[in-house]
Amino acid sequence: MDHGENQVQKEDRETVIRNQRFGLKLFAVYAVTYLLFILCCITSPDLLAATLFLGISNSVVFGFGLILLAIVIALIYGLACRGSGVVSTAAARDAQTQTGSEFKR
Amino acid sequence: MIYEVNYTAVTIFTLIVGLTLWLSVYLAKSATSASGFFAASGGIHWFVNGVAFAGDYLSAASFLGICGMIAFYGYDGFLYSIGYLSGWIVALLVVAEPLKRRGKYTFADALDAAFQSRAIRLSASISTLVVSVFYLIPQMVGAGALVQPLFGLPHWVGVTMVGAVVVAIVMTAGMVSTTYVQFLKGGLLVFFSLILTILILQRGFTVVPESERAARLADQIVEKTTDGRNLINGLPQGRGPGETDLRPVGEVLELPDGATATGPVGPFEFFRILQGSTIALWRGKTVENRTTYSATPTTGKEILRPGNLPALKGIRSEKWADRLNFVSLMLALFCGTAALPHILIRYYTVKDQASARKSTIVGIATIGFFYILTLYLGIGAMTSGAMDVSDNNMAAPLLARSFSNLLFALISAVAFTTVLGTVSGLIIAASGAVAHDLVPLITGRPLVDHAKIKVAKISALVVGLIAIGLGIAFQKMNVNYLVGWAFSVAASANLPALIMALFWSRATWQGITASIMVGMVSALAWILLSGDTFKDVYGLAADQSWIPFSQPGIVTIPLSFLTLILVSLLTTNTRKSVL
């Protein structure tokens, strides 16, 4: 089992910034949904006890929904970031992790 | 309850432990350099790393604690599942890729990349040790809870066994063996949880017969004698003549339309039937040395409403402080995942940021799927007629026993492996913090590769011994509740520093250091002075505490952010770069 040097894919600055912005937008969507769920728990317990979908309690629907939303968001992010970046070597990776300053301002 | 030794479980567990130790020895040659020992030389495939994320993250708290909470209190346990998973969104979309770009072996690497500050490295390594030890406690308690039915041995033996095996795994091949143990464990856990869920749906619900109802719903009284023995309903606890034991519990009292059994049910029908049913939920009330367990008929609708768990009863309270306690917990779970050092270091085991991203997505899918299953497992245990009324951590293995002894053996062994995987990750995170960050600070010069690995191995041994001691001391606490504390400390100490170091160009080393220390100390102080700790740890009345609610996150996370901003604005920025 080889755990030695391997080729790394270093993404360019524009790709990194684009991915980051898209990621933060998706994060905002999830964070707001999560917050609404928490607020629903403490302010509208009757809404959680009601059944709106398939005759199942909203508490279960919302809970499963939040978990599935996380998976969907992760997949969307993964697909959106697919194919970006350029190939470089392990040496480039080592250099950047040691300096931590690959993107100078 | 008294458990008989299950030799099948012992055999399966011994085989799994043997396999993990063999794997560790086999992989030892891959961990002869510091890069190999701490980060598997960045050579782990993203899919393996993704499943290993699940193996690292799905701890005893997730499997034993959440299933137990749902089995005894209903939906509230599932709130933990939701919160634990939500944190992965922060990890994927905010932290994963910049952390991978900046770090090498430890959480402190990423924080310190732009500053080269001794203060940041020191505070981050202390925080890593504190969070790892806090997180280790529930894992070790879970190990002890499992060893009783598995081996028929006392709690402390289980804790010591896990500690010894894990230290051996970490000392032989570091992150390489830890990764493959976690991969194995993550895969096994999800697979067997799925099998259990299918069996639960196949079995459906069955009402306890009228003729047995009085006997099965009678109160159960446990009394501790002065010489340390237990009396059950006035008789000595045991299996011999003149002795008795606690009855297993978990009764369905009514089904919709007066049915007595449902037969196999679908995954949605399962909840529809539960909503129209009545279940006996068992509660214990302790007065001095006497605990009385009583059954309370509870409707399915009530079971699926949040607010039954004592720690979360504030959801339904009229007091804002009680509601804030719940919000605070959910905030800590949301922010905590991306701040756990043993999770963060897994980003260094893959080759690049694309692999870090892909492995997180695999991790989220695996972990999310498992958490959906926890609701079925918990309710399945609640209605299984097999639970130990005195120990909710045993709900999942006992649910398996209600199907067959072989499944019980398999699930117990998998649960034990669950503990091994998580504890390995925690110990390697802690030993990395000592060898890579702390010791070079103390000695004033970086360690060479060989010395770094040696120090890491010694640290692994010491942390393992500490974990064993704490696992024995905290035996009686629910493992999931303890993990909630670890999340609060991690979210308060690490996340604000990490986010601001990565994304705020005006952050200074002084601000980051102050943020970590203030977040860590304030969260710890809040927890130690909270009503829950007064009651569960000090044995005092909860209302003697002057802390308004027990979960610190909603106060200490913003406090940590605020500290970082204020101190940074008051000091000079010396950072080299920001992204």
Image: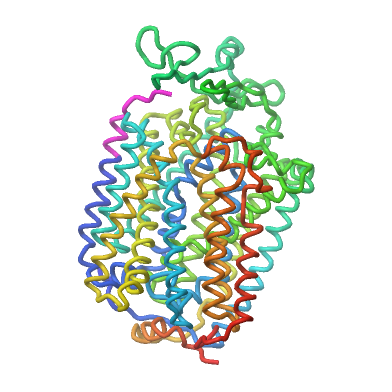
The x, y position of residue B288, in whole percent, is 54, 23
Q: Is residue B482 above or below residue B475?
A: below
Q: Is residue B345 above or below residue B147?
A: below
How many numbered circles does the render carry? 0
Q: Residue furthest top?
A: B242
Query: Dividing the picture into quarters, in which one does residue B535 lie?
Result: top right
Query: Dividing the picture into quarters, in which one does residue B84 lie?
Result: bottom right
Q: Residue at x 57, y 57 (%)?
A: B523
Q: Residue at x 34, y 45 (%)?
A: B468
| A38 or B437: nearer the viewer | B437
Q: Residue at x 31, y 49 (%)?
A: B465
Colouring method of the image: rainbow
The x, y position of residue B556, in whole percent, is 62, 60
The x, y position of residue B554, in whole percent, is 66, 57
Q: Which residues are magenta?
A: B1-12
Q: Is residue B130 above or below residue B576?
A: above
| B566 or A95: nearer the viewer | B566
